[in-house]
Image (cartoon, helix red, strand yellow):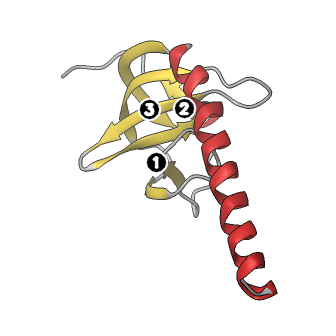
């Protein structure tokens, strides 16, 4: 094995370790989640901007969609993430994923 192949192998192994560690870091937080099951409204987002919806409860996670300010979404549950913001699992139409809870407010009076 030459030096270039060795560097590629070490980089790949480091990537796997980081990915595995991130997976384990998210798991305990999910266990500490609390069910919400209510309607929420996207707030705190500029009129020209959109709230990113993520695959996992982390700002570096893959973006799966976005919501406009003022949009109503169904909030399934939220989790408390240590040393970070809380995240909520939300759904609207075909878009389902995690958003930072600071951009949601509960809708008090709503009819289905």
Callout 2 environment at 10 Å: few (<14), some (14 to 19), or many (20+)? Answer: many
Q: How many marks?
A: 3
Q: Give residue 1's mark.
A: none
Q: Quadrant of residue 29?
A: top right
Q: Give residue 55's mark.
A: 1
Return the residue at label 3: 89
Q: Split into 4 quadrants, where in the image is the C terminus?
A: top left
Callout 3 environment at 10 Å: few (<14), some (14 to 19), or many (20+)? Answer: many
Q: Position of residue 68 (x, y in %)?
A: 46, 53
Mark 3 and mark 2: span between their CA atoms? Answer: 11 Å
Describe the element under mark 3 as helix, strand or loop.
Answer: strand
Describe the element under mark 1 as helix, strand or loop.
Answer: loop
Q: Residue furthest left?
A: 112
Return the residue at label 2: 104
Mark 2 vs mark 1, foreground winner is 1
Q: Earlier in the sequence, mark 2 or mark 1?
A: 1
Mark 2 and mark 1: span between their CA atoms? Answer: 17 Å
In the shown orientation, is residue 103 left or right of residue 69?
right
Describe the element under mark 2 as helix, strand or loop.
Answer: strand
């Amino acid at each position: 094995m030459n030096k270039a192949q060795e560097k590629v192998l070490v980089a790949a192994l480091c990537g796997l370790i980081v990915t595995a560690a991130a997976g384990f870091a998210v798991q305990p937080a999910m266990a500490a989640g609390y069910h919400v099951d209510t309607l929420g409204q996207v707030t705190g987002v500029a009129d020209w901007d959109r709230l990113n919806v993520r695959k996992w409860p982390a700002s570096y996670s893959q973006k799966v969609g976005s919501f406009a300010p003022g949009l109503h979404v169904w909030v399934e549950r939220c989790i408390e993430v240590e040393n970070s913001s809380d995240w909520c699992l939300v759904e609207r139409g075909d878009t389902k994923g995690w958003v930072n809870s600071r951009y949601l407010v509960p809708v008090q009076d709503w009819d289905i």
